[in-house]
Image (cartoon, rainbow, N blue to C red):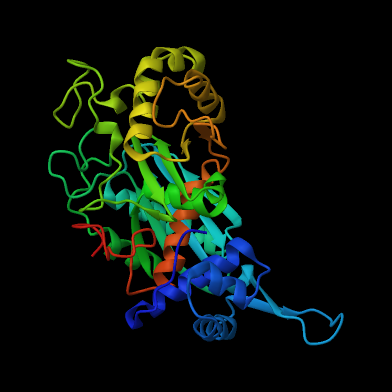
């Protein structure tokens, strides 16, 4: 599973989340198996299990004896133990989904609104939340998670240009989300939320180390190592879209020229007016250069291409990236392709955002689900 518990006293809330994730990933399972996987004592795990069971997050079952002694109690997640809502805000519109504790999407809704102002967006979010909550009116709602494009707290890049939420720089996002929802509210970069959704529910569950390349309105990516995202000093690691790849290339709103997302992104795809195959061929040099750079920098087991690319476009991008040039990833003992298309679809980011809310409620000391040391996105999540 990758994530490990901590035996330090302050880490108790974190351990609850880690144990719950272990049950989700491997259940039906046992206390002993969980303890071995997360690096905690059986006694510590048993205490946490008792709490989680009393609170309705997990279910236990003892099989009928088949010989001498009692068989161990098996544990599994209770899908009805709690629900959360994931929201994704982009320059193209709003998506939201009601998701149970097992990650199942109960219902989803969309609002097609271009570059919504904060007031307009939060009015729509309020209506979408009411619509989704009506699907399960009597269940325990744990919280709401909002994912949106970064980077954050960088004057020259944050909320600047067509691939970001321009004009949102001074919005108290977490405060307004909590007000409109009436629930605990959490904020995350969309590429990190999607990478977490991929780790929990997609191909990412198969790997300890993978790079998630988020093809959205802009372009981002994040390295996942042993179950945790590498976030950087200010939480902005992964803004690969602002890596210059074409000398004297197209000007970018960030102030540089030839940035990768000017070529590889939904915004670039729409601007060029080509079909999927034509676009993939046109940006093939930039895409391949980005992939081998990622491989040489991070040495992942694989790169997972996900985000908002429609399946036909994702397939064409994968075709354009076939037979990549040499890098440290060109190993004879590889067990996975160098590039894999995500199997999570557009709900990946919503499931990751909802999981953020679940973890934030279970581990309040640690705030950010995917970066236990960070309590908020600076300048935004207070």
| x then y, percent, for residue 188 | 34, 54
Quarter of the image holding residue 185? Answer: bottom left
159 and 223: which is toward the camera: 223
Q: Is residue 382 above or below residue 59?
A: above
Taking 173 as reference, is 322 left or right?
right
Q: Is residue 109 above or below residue 54?
A: above
Taking 242 as reference, is 141 left or right?
right
Q: Is residue 113 above or below residue 247?
A: below
**Is residue 218 in sight in this rendering?**
no
- Tell me which residue sits at (36%, 77%) in the image: 11
Q: Count the numbered circles shown.
A: 0
Quadrant location of the C terminus?
Answer: bottom left
- Tell me which residue sits at (56%, 48%) in the image: 206
In the displayed orientation, state which residue is furthest to the right: 66
365 and 122: which is toward the camera: 365
Quarter of the image holding residue 65? Answer: bottom right
- Tell me which residue sits at (29%, 32%) in the image: 241
| x then y, percent, for residue 100 | 58, 63
| x then y, percent, for residue 265 | 37, 28
């Amino acid at each position: 599973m990758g994530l490990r518990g901590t035996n330090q006293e302050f880490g108790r809330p974190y351990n609850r989340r880690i144990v719950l994730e272990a049950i989700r990933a491997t259940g039906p399972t046992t206390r002993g198996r969980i303890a071995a996987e997360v690096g905690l004592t059986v006694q510590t795990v048993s205490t946490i299990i008792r709490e989680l069971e009393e609170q309705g997050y997990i279910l236990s079952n003892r099989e009928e004896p088949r010989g001498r002694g009692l068989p161990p109690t098996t544990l599994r997640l209770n899908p009805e133990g709690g629900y959360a809502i994931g929201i994704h805000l982009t320059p193209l519109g709003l998506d939201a989904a009601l998701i149970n504790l097992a990650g199942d999407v109960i219902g989803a809704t969309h609002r097609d609104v271009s570059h919504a102002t904060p007031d307009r967006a939060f009015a729509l979010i309020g209506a979408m939340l009411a619509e989704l909550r009506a699907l399960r009116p009597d269940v325990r709602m744990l919280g709401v998670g909002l994912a949106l494009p970064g980077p954050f707290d960088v004057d020259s890049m944050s909320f600047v240009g067509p691939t970001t939420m321009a004009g949102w720089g001074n919005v108290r996002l977490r405060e307004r989300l909590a007000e409109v929802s009436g629930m605990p509210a959490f904020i995350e970069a969309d590429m990190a939320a999607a990478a977490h959704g991929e780790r929990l529910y997609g191909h990412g569950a198969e790997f300890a180390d993978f790079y998630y390349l988020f093809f959205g309105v802009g372009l981002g990516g994040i390295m996942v190592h042993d179950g945790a995202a590498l976030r950087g000093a200010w939480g902005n690691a992964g803004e690969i879209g602002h890596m210059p790849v074409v000398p004297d290339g197209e000007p970018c709103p960030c102030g540089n020229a030839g940035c990768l997302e000017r070529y590889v992104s939904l915004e670039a795809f729409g601007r060029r007016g080509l079909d999927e195959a034509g676009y993939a061929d046109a940006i093939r040099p930039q895409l391949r250069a980005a992939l081998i750079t990622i491989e040489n920098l991070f040495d992942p087991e694989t790169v997972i291409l996900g985000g908002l690319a429609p399946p036909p476009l994702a397939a064409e991008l994968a075709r354009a990236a076939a037979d990549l040039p040499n890098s440290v990833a060109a190993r004879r003992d590889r067990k996975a392709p160098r590039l894999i298309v995500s199997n999570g679809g557009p709900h990946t980011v919503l499931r990751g955002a909802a999981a953020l809310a679940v973890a934030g409620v279970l581990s309040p000391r640690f705030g950010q689900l995917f970066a236990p040391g960070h309590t908020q996105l600076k300048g935004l999540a207070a």
